Image (cartoon, grey):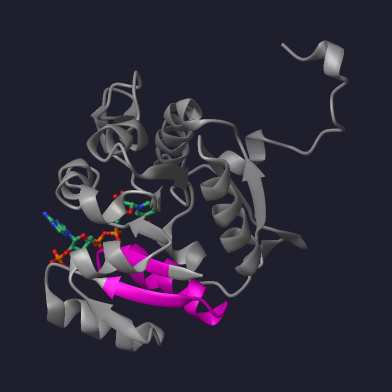
Amino acid sequence: MRIGILGSGAMAAALGGAWVRAGHDVLVGGRDRAAAAATAARIGAAKDGTLADAAAHGELVLAAVPAGVAPRLVNELAAHLAGRTVVDCTNSLEPGDDGPVPTTGGTTSVARLLADAAPGAHVVKAFNLCHVSIWTLPRPSFEGVPLAVPFCGDDPVSLGRTAELITSMGCTPMPCGGLSRAVYIEAAAAFAIGVWWSGAQPRFAFPAIERAPQASRP
Ligand SMILES: NC(=O)c1ccc[n+]([C@@H]2O[C@H](COP(=O)([O-])OP(=O)(O)OC[C@H]3O[C@@H](n4cnc5c(N)ncnc54)[C@H](OP(=O)(O)O)[C@@H]3O)[C@@H](O)[C@H]2O)c1
């Protein structure tokens, strides 16, 4: 798959590295060309360039920049991003009384802001729940179970590309519905990060259960 990455920092390197290892055609794009070239060289990506180069390269384009920057950036690149899949891995958090809270207030999502900023693009929320260190692991698996990656979006082609990408990394796609669900995935990140910061492990609160009968679901 042709993948463009907006940004050349930690998430760009971790996810980009996993995608290079999986055989994808990755272009790392940055506002700092030297930093983009250095990240591309470090992860073995064949290409690097500007942010516009990355937007124009990818069938799928990862926004790996601060959440406060991403809407304006995709708006500036909207002409390049039209018709493409834009994967939003951002988390936008600020301190709250009892831990981090989404800067969106939990009523909308960064992913929705990106979709509004680049209406021709197909936004998918994914890859924001795990710390960057997890994405550096080859085929991340825990207790013998491949990592599940929740994602959501409205465009079937883009959801298919995202699922293909997740599978190619050795992970399990976990489709969570339309882009309206991004607000919950982003809130889940705020919750999990708050629990981690308190020294606990959020995964212990989500034990495996047998699939509930359809009728008993809310
Ligand atoms: N780190 C994690 O564990 C983690 C986990 C999940 C999600 N995320 C999310 O992933 C995103 C990237 O995080 P990161 O850890 O990769 O951050 P990072 O290492 O600080 O990298 C951020 C990248 O964004 C670029 N950037 C900053 N401001 C920009 C602007 N105004 N225009 C264009 N590019 C700009 C930076 O470029 P310069 O080098 O030129 O400044 C850098 O390449 C964030 O939204 C974060 O919330 C991070």
Question: Considering depth in this image, is 143 or 82 the residue closer to the camera?
Answer: 82
Q: Tell me if residue 26 comes above or below residue 12 in the rendering.
A: below
Q: Residue 16's x, y, as percent?
A: 42, 71
Q: Is residue 125 magenta?
A: no
Q: Position of residue 86 (x, y in %)?
A: 38, 50
Instruction: Confirm whether the magenta stretch covers residue 25.
Output: yes
Q: Residue at x 33, y 65 (%)?
A: 5
Magenta residues span 3-28
Of residues 45 and 93, which is closer to you in this image?
45
Measured as percent of width and height from the top left, residue 36 is found at 22, 77
Residue that appears at 28% across and 67% down: 54
**Quadrant in which residue 103 is drawn:** top left
Looking at the rendering, the quadrant in which ligand 1 lies is bottom left
Confirm whether residue 143 shows in the render: no
Q: Is residue 138 visible?
A: yes
Q: Give the quarter of the image for residue 177.
A: top right
| Left or right of 19 on screen, residue 119 | left
